Image: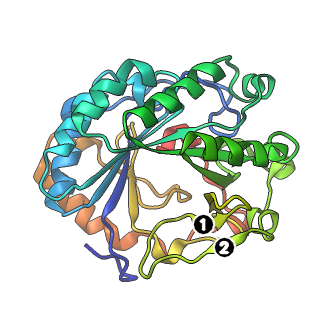
């Protein structure tokens, strides 16, 4: 399925809940709103439709998706589909030990774990929790179960930008891929963004860049440190990748979002129990996917990241 810019759209991120057990300022608004969560039946309907539309890749996100008790069964359901070949999960890692065996048995192959500091005091300040040791242990457990593990680090000036070498060392020693991500202006974090944003292209300019394979749609640029360790950088502001964007998003309150940074959501909640109508809505909406985001022109999404789906 292609949009009007001839981009093949075959990747969906599904936010199965906007609830989270951490309180990272850049991700959630300070006032906790009503919790929205898709049911197993609604999630299965979305999966069925995406499979019929020949989507190749799904990623379940939140909020924190491990707060939805149906997560393993939903992964197993998606894993049985004909066209869906790549199923991932984005999590903060706190509850991973509870669900790891079930998720692996369900067919999960890859997992992204958000971790913004290796320092206990900083971790506590960022997340308003003291779960660092548990998250680190769960990362190691995930690797032992042969999951492909990527650790996502949102870089923030004056908070964790002095930990870059620590994260690279952790990635080398743990056999996980570190991905440094630019802070984005989303939701009510405008003032925080203005004081903490970093240009990752400039920050890593002295590292050797690894060429991408032809037709690669991976949003990361890859670099190599002095030890030969390959790490990723995601730079949606300083080097946006909109021309190769192949994804859409479903939010936990029943919206179809064609761009992470566009508030032009399409309400699909009336169709979450009707596969034919949902399929038609997706088909007719794809051409409205914008050619690029406008964050560089001070356009800011008014929904917080946990409400959008990571």
Mark 2 sits on what residue? 209
Tag 2 and tag 1, C-beta contact below 8 Å: yes
Q: Residue at x 80, y 53 (%)?
A: 197
10, 211: nearer the viewer: 211
At label 1, counting other C-alpha atoms closer than 10 Å, the crowd grade (few under 14, some 14-19, many 20 or more) is some
Question: In the rendering, at what x and y percent does residue 303 appear?
Answer: 57, 44
Mark 1 sits on what residue? 222
- The CA distance from mark 2 to mark 1 is 6 Å
Left or right side of 170 for 146: left
Q: Is residue 218 visible?
A: yes
The mark nearer the N terminus, 2 or 1, is 2
Q: Residue at x 52, y 32 (%)?
A: 139
Residue 300, labelled with which disc?
Answer: none
88, 230: nearer the viewer: 230
Question: In the rendering, at what x and y percent does residue 230 appear?
Answer: 60, 60
Left or right side of 261 for 239: right
Snapshot quadrant of residue 142: top left
């Amino acid at each position: 399925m292609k949009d009007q810019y001839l981009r093949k759209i075959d990747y969906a991120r599904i936010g199965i809940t906007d609830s989270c057990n951490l309180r990272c300022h850049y991700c959630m608004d300070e006032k906790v709103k009503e919790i929205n969560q898709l049911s197993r039946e609604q999630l299965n309907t979305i999966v069925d439709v995406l499979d019929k539309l020949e989507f190749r890749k799904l990623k379940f996100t939140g909020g924190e998706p491990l707060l939805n008790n149906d997560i393993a069964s939903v992964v197993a359901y998606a894993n049985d589909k004909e066209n869906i070949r790549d199923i991932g999960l984005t999590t903060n890692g706190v509850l991973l030990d509870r669900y790891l065996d079930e998720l692996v048995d369900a067919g999960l192959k890859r997992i992204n774990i958000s971790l913004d500091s290796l320092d206990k005091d900083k971790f506590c300040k960022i997340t308003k929790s003291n779960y660092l040791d548990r998250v680190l242990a769960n990362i190691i457990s995930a690797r032992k179960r042969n999951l492909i593990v990527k650790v996502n680090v949102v870089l923030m000036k004056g908070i964790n930008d002095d930990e870059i070498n620590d994260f690279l060392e952790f990635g080398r020693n743990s056999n996980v891929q570190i991905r440094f991500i630019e802070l984005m202006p989303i939701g009510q974090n405008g003032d925080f963004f203005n004081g903490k944003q970093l240009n990752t292209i400039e920050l890593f300019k002295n590292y050797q860049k690894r060429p991408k394979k032809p037709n690669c749609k991976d949003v990361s640029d890859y670099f190599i440190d002095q030890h030969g360790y390959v790490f990723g950088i995601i730079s949606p502001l300083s080097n946006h990748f909109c021309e190769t964007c192949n994804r859409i998003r479903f939010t936990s309150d029943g919206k179809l979002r064609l761009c992470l940074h566009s508030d032009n959501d399409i309400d699909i909640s009336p169709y979450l129990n009707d596969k034919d109508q949902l399929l038609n809505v997706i088909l007719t909406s794809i051409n409205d996917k914008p050619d690029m985001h406008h964050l560089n022109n001070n356009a800011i999404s008014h929904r917080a990241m946990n409400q959008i789906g990571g």
